[in-house]
Image (cartoon, rainbow, N blue to C red):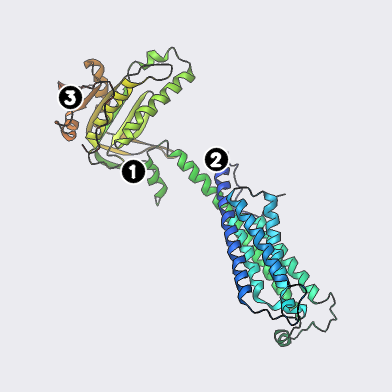
Amino acid sequence: MRLRLPTIGETPHLPGRVREAIRKQQESSEIAVGWIQLSIVVTFSILYALSPKPYTADPVFAPEPWVLGAYLLFTLARVVLAHRRALPDWLLYVSVVVDMLLLLALIWSIHVKYGQPASFYLKVPTLLYVFIFIALRALRFEARYVLIAGAVAAGGWLLMVLYAARMSFDDPMITRDYVEYMTSNSILLGAEFDKVISVLIVTGILAIAITRARDLLVRSVVESTAAAELSRFVPSEVAAQVKTSETRVEAGAGEVRETTIFFNDLQGFTTLSEGMTPVELISTLNEYFAAVTEPIIRHGGVINQYQGDAILATFNLPRALDDHAAGAVRAAIEIQHILGARTFGAGLRLTSRVGINTGVVVGGLVGAQDRLGYTVHGDDVNLAARLEALNKEHGTRIIVSERTRELAGPDRFAFQTLGTVTVRGRNRPVTIYRIDVDPSPAPEEPRGA
């Protein structure tokens, strides 16, 4: 049965990937616990080796080396298992109990070491390590281990008090005089009960704090995992802005910048898809998108939308890019080489058309209050789509606008003029250019060329 304290809210059902993330975090915590324990036992061993051995008589049995040796072996085994991610729950429970019992045994042995009555060990400062061992369990963010450690510590100390008092309240070692208690081996039961109560209170506070912190940890993991997944649906730069925003993101916030808009569409895919099953269709599309998205991203573009079998990408928004027009042209040329060199799905040869335009657009979040999406708007976005469609009319694969040609560098690419046209939806004519591409694979042009 799992111990549970009141929390700040019910933890929702966790998906498998979230549970896996939490499990990895817990395994890392156990490694940290093991190394801290190892440092503690090494510290104890060094202090024991350096300290004098003031036994009043030749002891038949010296408990400290045995306790420290057993604790060292147990801790080493625990560290090894933690690194191998092979610590079962039952061993964690055993570890909590063994750690505390070994510490209490070490405290108990002190009166033997100094040849004093049993009440002598009740005043040693080594008791403070009990709180360290309890706090150590907080690293796992599970209150049950803290509660077990505190219960064993409180119960163990209570038994040690009763043992020192010889189980009799009439024993002359028991006193009510605080001065006598502090200056002799007398036992002040109230002081010992205060220690037990302090252990229990610290345990309870830690358990509540850990339970609350665990709820926050779970929520944090859920939200961060969701954010990582959702960042696949919007540009990573937008996802980063949302995560670091000081206020709740709202629709309407946008950025205006000169941007190169890249519009890519498959040619004749509707006809090809008629002979495919839905599974074959989506598989072929995904294979195609993976192939053509890679050069777009590598040359600095950001995918804004997948629209059916089309891709809308932007260069210089939301990610700043100095040579954005040339980057878009390079990506378009490389896509043609990729499509000319391979097949998709069941041996299909695919071709695509690209329209590229450069102009001032606005990019930002649009939509309703509870459902937003990132996109770019402006007349120059529409022009890029119109240029893509003109490829069909001119029998070309890549058409760019005058502004794109100007920024990309007229001498850097093989631009061929197609004249001036008036595209649908615009009154002013525009000068357009084609880029003739050999569909055979070509070496990638060095970046910055």
Viewer-nearest of discs 3 and 2: 2
Q: Which residue: 54% across, 48% down?
A: 219
Q: Which residue is mark 1?
A: 253
Query: In the image, which disc is placed on residue 17?
Result: 2
Q: Residue 104 appears at what percent x and percent y?
A: 71, 68
Q: Which residue is mark 3?
A: 432
Residue 342 visible? The answer is yes
Q: Indicate whether 211 appears above or below 193.
A: above
Gap between marks 2 and 1, in whole Å? Answer: 32 Å
Q: Residue 313 appears at what percent x and percent y?
A: 31, 32
Gap between marks 3 and 1, in whole Å? Answer: 33 Å
First in residue order: circle 3 vs circle 1: 1
Left or right of 409: which side holds 72?
right
Quarter assignment of residue 231? top left
Q: Which residue: 37% across, 27% down?
A: 291
Q: Give SS at disc 1.
A: loop
CB-based contact (under 8 Å), mark 3 and mark 1: no
Q: Indicate whether 211 appears above or below 287.
A: below
First in residue order: circle 3 vs circle 2: 2
Q: Give SS at disc 3.
A: strand
Residue neighbourhood size for the residue with mark 3, other residues' Cα within 10 Å, grouped as few (<14), some (14–19), many (≥20): many
Q: Indicate whether 158 appears above or below 27.
A: below
Front residue of this view, candidates 380 and 293: 293
Q: Residue 293 appears at what percent x and percent y?
A: 35, 30
Q: Amino acid at mark 3?
A: Ile
Q: Amino acid at mark 1?
A: Ala
Viewer-nearest of discs 2 and 1: 2
Q: Residue 275 appears at what percent x and percent y?
A: 44, 12
Left or right of 51: which side holds 179?
right
